[in-house]
Image: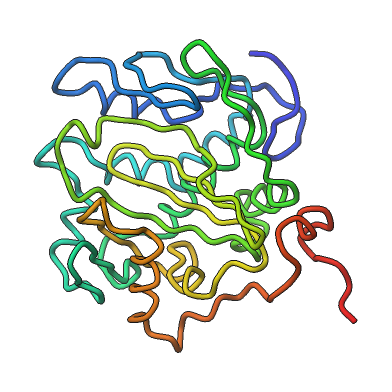
Amino acid sequence: MPVGTCALCLETRELRDSHFLPAGFYRIMREGSGEDPVLVNKSAAFMSSAQARAHLLCGECEHRFNDGGEDWVLKNCWRSRTKFPLHSALIGVTPFVDEQGFRSYEGKKIPGVEIDKLAYFGASIFWRAAVRRWMVGKEKDARLPLGPYQEALRLYLLGKTGIPDGVVQIVTLSAVLDDLHNRVSAMPWLFERKPEYRSYKFMVTGFTFHMFFGMMIPKPIGRICSARHGFLAIVLRRSESRSSLMFTCARHAPSSRLAIRAPRRPAWRTYFRTGPKGPPRN
């Protein structure tokens, strides 16, 4: 194994051949049909057995990612039309929002649901997409330009801090359990670019992870942060506006526990230049 600087702990160590997505996801996507999974990058969707990989992490940090969330997510993600453990756990309880097209749940109150591991896994994928370019198919995807949030996520993944200020993650589950909608992996992509924030998404085996970055994220979005507050959602109607669904969920959420912790600070570009602590206030 080559020796170099581990991207996570920054120590000089032997580097493992790290996968962008854990190899277990590729095995799940091939189960049953035996066909290559559908991969989606910035320019195309295609079937391929190729796995994005690079010498990125040392053995200790690979183990940290596995224990931190990968192993739990692999055991609870979509596997077939009849097996999606986390989906089954949610369907078995009463949602706190149940409207046409949308159901939302307080994941932290559901036995067996380890929301911290789900959120950790999602954060690790966005961070991996920021630290280097990954070969997907015949081309490399661009790095996510997270600016100071990249270092903030690194410290969180190392266990040195909690969820960084100005970061919100929302996790939704697929309502449809067929192969077409779930035997797919989509690399992180820019979903929204606004003066107040930017947001990115990625998809894998029944999950969509949506992460917002910025110090002026609307409060209704912050109130349903999966990482901080444990909320999970099943979106039943694809035509429904995602923004409308999030505001519906926030409207019903118990407000006493859901104040977003990030203070109001300058918009994305100013914050992007000045770093996690922001400019001094007058």
Q: Determine which quarter of the picture holds residue 186.
A: top left
Is residue 26 visible in the rendered structure shown here? yes
- Count the numbered circles shown: 0
Q: Is residue 158 above or below residue 36?
A: below
Residues 7 and 181: in front is: 181
Q: Position of residue 7 (x, y in %)?
A: 69, 34
Q: Determine which quarter of the picture holds residue 265.
A: bottom right
Q: Position of residue 173 (x, y in %)?
A: 28, 51
Q: Residue furthest top?
A: 138
Q: Residue furthest bottom?
A: 256
Q: Which corner quadrant holds the N terminus?
A: top right
Colour theme = rainbow
In this rendering, would 60 be left or right of 94?
right
Q: Position of residue 191 (x, y in %)?
A: 50, 46
Is residue 64 visible in the rendered structure shown here? no
Please report the residue visible at 59 percent of the width from the left and 60 percent of the height from the top.
Answer: 167
Q: Is residue 156 above or below residue 55?
A: below
In this rendering, would 131 be left or right of 65?
right
Please report the residue visible at 34 percent of the width from the left and 28 percent of the height from the top.
Answer: 24
In this rendering, would 185 be left or right of 217?
left
Residues 195 and 205: in front is: 195
Q: Position of residue 219 (x, y in %)?
A: 53, 75
In this rendering, would 251 be left or right of 173?
right
Please report the residue visible at 26 percent of the width from the left and 56 percent of the height from the top.
Answer: 235
Q: Determine which quarter of the picture holds residue 250.
A: bottom left
Q: Which corner quadrant holds the C terminus?
A: bottom right
Please report the residue visible at 25 percent of the width from the left and 74 percent of the height from the top.
Answer: 97
